[in-house]
Image (cartoon, rainbow, N blue to C red):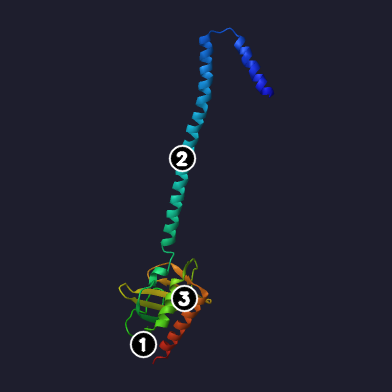
Amino acid sequence: MKSSFGSDNSFRELGRIPRSQKQKQESLQKILSGIEEKPKRRKAIFPGFLSAAAVMAACVMFAFIIFSEDSMTTGSSSSEMLGNSFISQTTIAISETEESFSADGKYSAETATVQDPKWENTARNAINSATLSETVIDAKPSYDIQFILKGKDPVKMKVWDAEGKVYFKIMDSEEIYSVPAAEGAIFIDYLEAIAQSIQNTP
């Protein structure tokens, strides 16, 4: 209430100052136009700032989504190696070196050819569930495997059974994949049984 009376007294004192009617009208117009223009300026600047911030945030989110999708789809998934492709035949051999490949599909006493739905299901589960690993393996690979797929190029891989864990990599690739423990155990059981049959073959 005090501020209201104070303002009224100030206006009354201004009214006593001798000025022409024109000067009074001009002063009133300046005050009124100043009051009207200030909110307009604030409204014009604030939404402009908001829209610029929204555009920047959208650009950052878009770039983050694109980068995330690229990193997820570039070499980090093993599910596309076999996927749901029909496995017409698997050739398995005991690996000799990391550079050479023994299971090239040619018949020999050192290889085994497998056509078995249970094995194919086990292999598919193990490979499709594997994740990219940063493990550095110094040991020699345990097995060489070649999958012959219907309508696709053969998939050739090296398999390690190292310290109770199963790893593999595709030939001509440096990426090592780790198989989850449950799937890896069944996968290795099959491979060990096949290896025993190779070694027992005269």
As rendered, which of 59 and 176 lies closer to the eye? 59
Amino acid type of the residue tagged 3 in the rendering: Trp
Q: Which mark is residue 166?
A: none
Against 155, is 74 above or below? above
Whole-percent x and y of residue 127?
43, 73
Whole-angstrom CA distance, mark 2 to mark 3, is 56 Å
Compared across the picture, whether 85 is left or right of 29 comes to left
Whole-angstrom CA distance, mark 1 to mark 3, is 22 Å
Determine which residue is flagged by label 3.
160
Against 85, is 9 above or below? above
Secondary structure at numbered mark 1:
loop
Q: Residues within 10 Å of mark 1 (few under 14, many from 20)?
A: few
Determine which residue is flagged by label 1.
109
Secondary structure at numbered mark 2:
helix
Residue at the location (42% across, 81% down)? 119
Whole-angstrom CA distance, mark 2 to mark 1, is 72 Å
Amino acid type of the residue tagged 1 in the rendering: Ala
Please say if the residues under marks 2 and 3 sit with CB atoms less than 8 Å apart: no
Determine which residue is flagged by label 2.
51
